[in-house]
Amino acid sequence: EVQLVESGGGSVQAGGSLRLSCAASGSPVSRHYVGWFRQAPGKEREGIVRIYLGSGYTIYADSVKGRFTLSQDSAKSTIYLQMNSLKPEDTAMYYCAASPFRPADARAISPADFGLWGQGTQVTVSS
């Protein structure tokens, strides 16, 4: 089974940058969908980016489009989320997730489409 471990979270001032990592181990993920999600206290988990590792096709939520960029290092089975121009509203616990199955809605980044989750990494953006 695939295990996912996130890292790279921390505290940064508004306008700053962070790079999150999601390291996959246990089984190959080259044909998996991988998503990044975030959840702020009292709010629902929000999908922000999803990639199909088989093709590299990536979609972003409007809330992060143009500021966040996903990349992958296939040799290391690691997916990176580069976050630039961070805002206080980006403060949340960030999770990566994986699934070998096609999402129910190709246009949505839904937590319900993912069954494998990491433990999360906290991102705090101060104003």
Image (cartoon, helix red, strand yellow):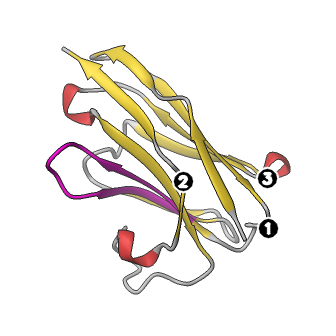
Q: Secondary structure at mark 1?
A: loop
Give the foreground label among 3 and 1. Answer: 1
Give the residue type at disc 3. Ser
Res 118 label: 2
**In this rendering, would 103 be left or right of 8?**
left
Q: Residues within 10 Å of mark 2 (few under 14, many from 20)?
A: some
Q: Position of residue 109 (x, y in %)?
A: 37, 67
Say which label, 3 or 2, has the lower sequence index: 3
Quadrant in the picture for residue 44: bottom left
Say which label, 1 or 2, has the lower sequence index: 1
Indicate whether 101 appears above or below 3: below
The residue under label 1 is 27
Distance from disc 3 to disc 2, alpha carbons, whole Å, reads 18 Å
Give the foreground label among 3 and 2. Answer: 2
The residue under label 3 is 74
Distance from disc 1 to disc 2, alpha carbons, whole Å, reads 15 Å
Which residue is at a point 47% across and 25% down the rendered structure image? 18
Pick the residue in front: 77 or 42: 42
Q: Residues within 10 Å of mark 1 (few under 14, many from 20)?
A: few
Magenta-colored span? 34-51
Give the residue type at disc 2. Gly
- Report the quarter where the N terminus lies: bottom right
What kind of secondary structure does the magenta stretch mostly adopt?
A: strand
Q: Position of residue 113 (x, y in %)?
A: 43, 77
Q: Secondary structure at mark 2?
A: loop
Which residue is at a point 67% across and 65% down the rendered structure image? 53
Quadrant in the picture for residue 90: top left
Quadrant in the picture for residue 116: bottom right
Q: Are marks 3 and 2 in contact (CB under 8 Å)?
A: no
Q: Position of residue 47 (x, y in %)?
A: 34, 59
Which residue is at a point 67% across and 59% down the rendered structure image? 3
